[in-house]
Image (spheres, grey):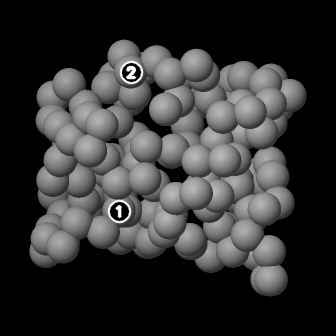
Amino acid sequence: MLNRILSTADCAECKLCCNFYEHELWEAPITGEEVSYDERGLYFCPELGEKGCKLVSERPFDCQIYPFRVMKLGEFTVIALSPLCKKVNEKPLSELVEFVESELFEKVKSHHAQIKDYDKSYVILKVL
């Protein structure tokens, strides 16, 4: 879904969105599996392989749209951008807003994304 602004190769190389410290587990997709940590205190998504996500097109919606997030801010639902994805955050803000409005907005509206509470480190790009 994000191919226009983020290549599969960039995602497979980085994998930052597929590992979490305990305080970041709110970001992890729900897998139904028990959470265990490595020696550095990181939890890795069980679907993460050497070449990236093993689920490819079957990934949870939250994973499909990362680094964008559907979040709840008071009475509003917003589409926000994670500060962690370096490749996407290098893009001009105008390009990201245009992408959200032209490609992501309708998909988010028609999909039941897991709505997370707003985190102030995220940049709000669209109010739904």
Q: Earlier in the sequence, mark 1 or mark 2?
A: 2
Give the residue type at disc 1: Pro
Q: Residue 79 versus residue 35: which sits nearer the camera?
A: 79
Q: Is residue 82 visible?
A: no
The quadrant holding residue 60 is bottom left
Residue at far bottom of view: 75
Instruction: Judge whether residue 72 can be spotted in this image.
Output: yes
Viewer-side residue, 14 vs 61? 61
Q: Which residue is mark 2?
A: 8
* Left or right: 43, with 75 as reference point: left
Which residue sits at x=72%, y=23%? 91
Q: Is residue 111 left or right of residue 45?
A: right
Return the x and y of residue 92 as percentages of the image width and height: 80, 23
Q: Note whether 71 is above or below 103 in the view shown.
A: below
The amino acid on which the numbered mark 2 sits, given as a three-letter code, is: Thr
Which quarter of the rendered picture does the C terminus lie within?
bottom right
**Image quadrant in which you'd find residue 70:** bottom right
User: How far, Cα to Cα, is label 1 from label 2?
Assistant: 19 Å
- Mark 1: which secondary structure? loop
Q: Position of residue 53 (x, y in %)?
A: 24, 37
Local crowd size for mark 1, using a 10 Å CA cut-off: few (<14), some (14–19), many (≥20): some
Q: Residue at x 18, y 73 (%)?
A: 32
Q: Would you call the spot at circle 2 few (<14 residues within 10 Å), some (14-19), or many (20 or more)?
A: few
Looking at the picture, does residue 67 appear above or below residue 94?
Answer: below
For this rendering, which residue is in front, 95 or 101? 101
| Residue drawn where x is 43% and y is 43% of the image | 64
Q: Which mark is residue 29?
A: 1
| Residue closest to the eye, 20 or 31 | 31
Point out residue 83 in the picture as x, y percentages from the top left corner: 64, 45
